[in-house]
Image (tube, rainbow, N blue to C red):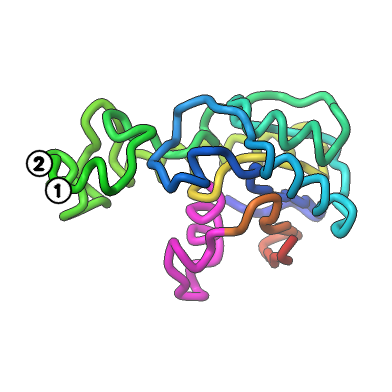
Amino acid sequence: MWHTNGAKIKISLIRHGKTYANEQKLYYGFSDIDLSENGIKELKELKKQIKYEKGQLFITSGLKRTIQTLNILFDNVDYIVNEHFKEMNFGDFELKSYEQLKKDKNYLKWIENIEENEVPNGETKKQFENRVINGLNSVFQHCIENDIKDVVIICHSGVIAIIMMYLFNEENKNFYDWLPSYGKGYTIIFKNKHKIYNKI
């Protein structure tokens, strides 16, 4: 699947900046909220410290926090939306905290087996994983077919962790080991059948 036929393809995965939901430790995935003032300030500081390399193709999940992050880090470049890269849909748990949910029977059932149990009006972790990997496959194929060598995807921490676990499962890291901080992530370089990554 990941053979580049001699080309070198670089895909950078960058987490969006902080929102009020992050600051208040709320579950949220599909909720479309803006970056917080602190989130904007932190990204502007990071931009001074990190050399964010521009790509031929920019992709966001379509949610405001990813578009705003792209505009701060890359100065309002053109982009396309790929909704495969949205964060997990937490359904009825969206914008609620553990404290608010800890006595909810549906929540207690869900956390017994997060991999398989569906969030009411949301999705299972397995459904989320399949969605993200399908999105990654489609981007990779698009790069091969259109001679695109450098892609930047502004998305979400859970999305990034799933992709890194999938591509580098030999490292035996778990989901939480791969979660990047705000404005950070990984650059994956594909060449023929080989792939390596660097931290951003």
Q: Is residue 111 above or below residue 54?
A: below
Picture disc at residue 108: 1
Residue under the point 55% across and 66% down: 168
Outermost residue, left direction? 105
Looking at the picture, how far across and down is residue 101, in whole percent?
22, 42
Q: Residues within 10 Å of mark 2 (few under 14, many from 20)?
A: few
Q: Is residue 163 magenta?
A: yes
Q: Is residue 156 left or right of residue 80?
A: left
Q: Is residue 57 left or right of residue 2?
A: right
Looking at the picture, how far across and down is residue 181, in whole percent?
62, 57
State the residue in front, 49 or 163.
49
State the residue in front, 181 or 173.
181
Let me know if residue 190 appears in the view.
Answer: no
Q: Three-letter amino acid code at disc 2? A: Lys
Q: Is residue 24 left or right of residue 184?
A: left
Q: Is residue 46 above or below residue 156?
A: below
Q: Three-letter amino acid code at disc 1? A: Leu
Q: Which residues are magenta?
A: 159-179
Residue under the point 82% across and 52% down: 45
Looking at the picture, how far across and down is residue 20, in whole percent?
54, 38
What number of labels is visible? 2
Q: Is residue 116 above or below residue 120?
A: below
Tag 1's secondary structure?
helix
Contact between marks 2 and 1 (CB within 8 A): the answer is yes
Q: Residues within 10 Å of mark 1 (few under 14, many from 20)?
A: few
Looking at the picture, how far across and down is residue 28, in whole percent?
42, 37
Residue denoted by label 2: 105
Q: Quadrant of residue 196?
A: bottom right
Residue under the point 85% across and 50% down: 47
**Quadrant for the C terminus in the image:** bottom right
State the residue in front, 148 or 19.
19
Tag 2's secondary structure?
helix
